[in-house]
Image: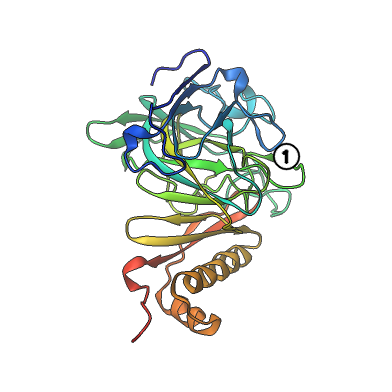
């Protein structure tokens, strides 16, 4: 998708089947490319850019986490990105009929790097191995360094060189959205660098094409936003950034009435995933494990202690990121291991 002036085009099929048309051709499609002035830097606090019916496919684009300001070697984000303009979001989108107590099911249909380069950067006062105002350390902060990656879509890799030019390496492309969320409750507006129960800056690699993300609705319409395209990322995101880049985005938004989702959940072809964010890290894990125990109970009818035992022996718990204001942990259970009731 070519970057252009703001465009909103709603195409609705003649035959509409509410909230769940079986044939994708019968679903409405919203084509929306934001102008830079329409990007948002908080979850909450903004009027919707469009109202959509449940079942709508959104075909869109989102800017990189540097607000598109870093375009060539030698530019440092701290000098060219306006303060508060981290992780610009596309949206929000008002989902007709969504109200608190419901859940949005966001099917990630397609994610594609929108540029032939990606960026990664270290920042003073940010990163898992850097001193911050809360992780106080003696000694100078690590330097701010930017790495440009060349994106080879044919081979499915991104390539870069060391700062001194002596070494080169490749990273397999695995695009996902670093940010996906709804508006928080109670009139809050939260920075786009923060993850929480409404989603936000989860930096979770499972927010990728082929998967479905479930987000609990906190305000009327849900007010769904997305951004922070990642072309690839290692677990933990320890330097503070992934391979950051603008992204072409296609997703379908469904509405599940009457189902609360306290924390983000994800279904992949092979796993169910609960996502928790908090500090310290063990509390993020506790949030995700507790939610997974509840999810297993919902799916199977198990009692709490049996579900607790099942999750304890079957879970994987990768760390998504340990750099944001809240850390994020995923708890994953292989779907094939979820038991049916014994007869």
Residue 215 appears anywhere in the view: yes
- The residue lying furthest to the top in this view is 5
Question: SS of the residue at dot 1?
Answer: loop
> How many labels were placed on the picture?
1
- State the residue in front, 12 or 102: 12
Residue at horizontal 73%, vertical 48%?
133
Of the 4 image quadrants, the one containing the C terminus is bottom left
Q: Position of residue 146 (x, y in %)?
A: 50, 32
Q: Position of residue 37 (x, y in %)?
A: 62, 18
- State the residue in front, 57 or 247: 57
Residue at horizontal 47%, vertical 14%?
4
Residue 166 appears anywhere in the view: no
- The residue lying furthest to the bottom in this view is 343
Residue at horizontal 40%, vertical 45%?
208
Mark 1, other Cα within 10 Å: few <14 / some 14–19 / many ≥20: some
Residue at horizontal 29%, vertical 37%?
157
- State the residue in front, 57 or 165: 57
Of the 4 image quadrants, the one containing the N terminus is top left
- Which residue corresponds to mark 1? 189
Residue 95 appears left or right of 171: right
- The residue lying furthest to the left in this view is 154
Colour scheme of the rendered structure: rainbow
Q: Position of residue 98 (x, y in %)?
A: 60, 44
Q: Position of residue 329 (x, y in %)?
A: 53, 60
């Amino acid at each position: 998708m070519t970057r252009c002036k703001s465009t909103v085009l709603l195409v609705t099929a003649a035959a509409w089947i509410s909230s769940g048309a079986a044939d994708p051709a019968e679903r409405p499609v919203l084509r929306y490319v934001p102008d830079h002035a329409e990007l948002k830097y908080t979850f909450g606090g903004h009027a919707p850019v469009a109202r959509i019916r449940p079942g709508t496919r959104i075909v869109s684009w989102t800017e990189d986490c540097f607000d598109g300001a870093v375009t060539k070697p030698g530019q440092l984000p701290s000098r060219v990105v306006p303060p508060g303009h981290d992780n610009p979001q596309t949206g929000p989108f008002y989902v007709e009929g969504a109200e608190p107590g419901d859940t949005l099911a966001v099917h990630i249909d397609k994610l594609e790097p929108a540029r032939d380069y990606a960026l990664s950067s270290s920042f003073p006062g940010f990163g898992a191995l850097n001193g911050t105002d809360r992780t106080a350390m003696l000694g100078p902060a690590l330097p701010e360094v930017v790495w440009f990656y060349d994106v080879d879509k044919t081979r499915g890799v991104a390539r870069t060189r060391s700062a001194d030019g002596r070494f080169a390496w490749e990273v397999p492309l695995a695009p996902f959205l670093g940010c996906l969320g709804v508006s928080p409750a109670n009139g809050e507006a939260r920075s786009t660098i923060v993850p929480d129960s409404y989603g936000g800056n989860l930096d979770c690699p499972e927010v990728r094409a082929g998967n479905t993300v479930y987000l609990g609705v906190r305000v009327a319409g849900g007010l769904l936003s997305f951004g922070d395209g990642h072309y690839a990322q290692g677990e933990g995101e320890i330097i503070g950034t992934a391979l950051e880049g603008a992204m072409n985005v296609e997703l379908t938004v469904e509405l599940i009435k009457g189902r609360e989702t306290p924390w983000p959940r994800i279904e992949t072809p092979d796993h169910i995933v609960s996502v928790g964010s908090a500090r310290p890290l063990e509390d993020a894990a506790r949030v995700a494990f507790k939610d997974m125990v509840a999810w297993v109970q919902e799916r199977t009818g198990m009692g709490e202690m049996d579900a607790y035992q099942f999750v304890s022996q079957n879970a994987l718990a990768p760390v998504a990121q340990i750099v944001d204001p809240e850390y994020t942990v995923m708890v994953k259970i292989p779907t094939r291991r979820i038991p049916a009731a014994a007869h």
